[in-house]
Amino acid sequence: MGDRIQFTAPANDLKIANRELGTVEAIAQDGQMRLKMDGGRDVQLDPHQHAHLDHGYAVTSHSSQGQSAERVLIHVDTELAAKGLLNSRMAYVAVSRGAEDAQLYTNDRAKLPQALGHDVSHESAHVPTMKPEQAITPKQPEIARVIEHGMGLGHSL
């Protein structure tokens, strides 16, 4: 009892969205679970019918959008392969989830400002770049010499 869980798929019959969080309040002898969802609703569920559950103690900032927690722990790896995901917006979203406390952990304190300093507020999700030599230019039609036959003085067809 008291365990935090997260749904990893929607449970439409229970009106529960994917990544919604709750707390286990009771587990009956037959396995039925009573949950207190973070939105305040009480839900009864059979885990055999709703097997898409995971621990809800640590969640990504993406899956926690629109939610807050008493405290948040944020891990920023400055050597991470997905550096495009590290930016000022991600930092703001992650830090703003904590109502009372937010702690940031990193592998390289000196590189942290550069990793999180990238501003993406005016960029689209994908901005294609193309070098001028890669541009596709429409092929020009070949102009062939056209010889017309017709009637003229002294000529006949």
Image (cartoon, rainbow, N blue to C red):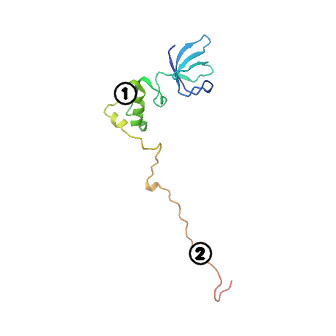
Residue at 50% across, 59% down:
137
Which of the numbered marks, if any, corresponds to residue 146? 2
Residue 48 percent coordinates (x, y):
62, 19
Classify the position of the C terminus by image quarter: bottom right
Pointer 1: residues within 10 angstroms few (<14), some, or many (20+)? few
Q: Amino acid at mark 1?
A: Leu
Q: Nearer the viewer, residue 99 or 128?
A: 99
Q: Nearer the observer, disc 1 or disc 2?
A: 1
Name, please, the residue furthest toward the bottom. Answer: 154
Q: Amino acid at mark 2?
A: Val
Residue 98 percent coordinates (x, y):
41, 26
Name, please, the residue furthest toward the right. Answer: 157
Residue 15 percent coordinates (x, y):
59, 26
Image vertical order of residue 23 relative to residue 17, above or below = above
The quadrant where residue 133 appears: bottom left
CA gap between label 1 and label 2 equals 76 Å
Residue at 58% across, 16% down:
33
Residue at 46% across, 23% down:
58
Name, please, the residue furthest toward the top. Answer: 29
Q: Counting residues from the N terminus, which is met first, the one under dot 1 or under dot 2?
A: 1
Q: Nearer the viewer, residue 149 or 62?
A: 62
Which of the numbered marks, if any, corresponds to residue 84? none
**Contact, CB < 8 Å: mark 1 with mark 2?**
no
Q: Which residue is mark 1?
A: 104
Q: Secondary structure at mark 1?
A: strand
Whether residue 87 appears in this view of the structure is: no
Image vertical order of residue 34 relative to residue 157, above or below = above
